[in-house]
Image: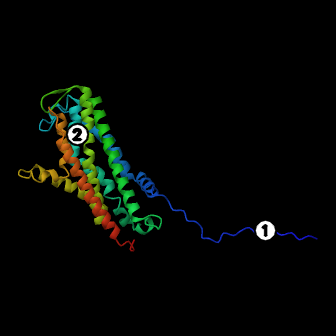
Amino acid sequence: MSATTTAAAPVDTSPATRRHPGALAPLRWEIRKLRAQYRAKAVLIGALVLPVIVVVVIQGQSRPPKDTLFGRFATDNGFALSLLVLGFAAQWVLPLLTAVVAGDIFASEDQHGTWKTVLTRSTSRAQLFWAKTLTACGFAVIVLAVLATSTIVSSVLIVGHQPLTGLSGQTIPAAEALRLVAASWATMLPAMLGFTCLAILLSVWSRNPAVGIAAPVVIGMVMQLVGALGGVEAIRPFLLTTPFEAWHGLFADPRFTGPLTEGLITSAAWCAVCLGAAFVMLRRRDITGG
C-alpha cells in the first residue's frame, strides 16, 4: 500500500492585522452625533421659521423703524426688510446660533466623562480636534445659509421686490438688489466663523457647555457696545463684531470694499488665535479622570 502524504496548510502565526479607521472616521462620527442632537435641530428649525414670523410682524406695523439702516423702507421693500433683519441678526443672533453647537462640542465630552472613550488608540487628539472643529464650522455655514435664505425669500414674497434705494440715494434695480442682499448675508460668514472658533476655545478651556455657549454671546455684546463708543477708532478694526458691518459699502455709490477685506483679515486672525490656543489646551489636557 502506497503511502500518501498530505501537505499541511501553512499556519499564519503573525499577529492579526489591525484595521485603523481613516482620518475621516472621526469627522463622520461627529456629524452623526450632531445630527442626533435635538438642540441643533431646534436651531435649524428656528433659523427657518422665525425669520418668516419677524417679516410678517414688521410688515404689519404702521410705522417702520426709521432709526435703523433701510428701516424706513422695510414695510414697502422686501430687500430693505431683509437688510433690516440682517443688521439685527449680526448684533445679537449670529454669535448665539453658532455657539449653540461650537460651545458645547468639546465641553460635552467633559460633562459626560467620555474623553477616554473617544480618544482611542485609533483616533488621535489632533484628529478629534479637527473633526469637531470642522463639524462646528460646517454647522455655522448651514445655519447661516438657512437663516439668510428664509429671510430673503419671505421678505421678497411677503413685502415685494421693488427697486431698492441705496445708502447714497441711488436706485438699485431689483435683480442687482437681490444679488447685493445675498452677498451681504454671505459677508457674515467670516465673522461668524470667528465666533465659532471663539466658542470652541471657551468650550475647551471651561469644560462647561453653559460657558461655551453663553460667553461668546456676552463677549459679542460687549464688543458691540465698545465699538459704539467714541474715541475707540484704534481698536475697532480688531473687534470681531466690526466685520459684521462691512456690508454697508456694497450699497454706497461708489461702492467700497475695504472694510470687507479688513474684516476678512480680522476674522482669520481670531480663528487662528482661538483654534491655536484651543488645540494646545487639548493636547496638554490630562484625561485620565474621564
> What residue is disc 2 on?
85
In the image, residue 85 lies at what x, y percent? 22, 39
Q: Is 36 placed above or below 246 here? A: below
Q: Amino acid at mark 1?
A: Ala
Rendering quarter of residue 131: bottom left
The reply to whether residue 213 is visible in this rendering is no
> What residue is disc 1 on?
7
- The label nearer to you, 1 versus 2, is 1
Rendering quarter of residue 123: bottom left
Q: Amino acid at mark 2?
A: Val
Q: Name, please, the residue furthest toward the bottom.
A: 288
Q: Name, please, the residue furthest toward the right.
A: 1
In the image, residue 166 lies at what x, y percent? 16, 31
- Choose the circle earlier in sequence order: 1 or 2: 1
| Callout 1 touching callout 2 (CB < 8 Å) | no
In the image, residue 47 lies at what x, y percent? 31, 43
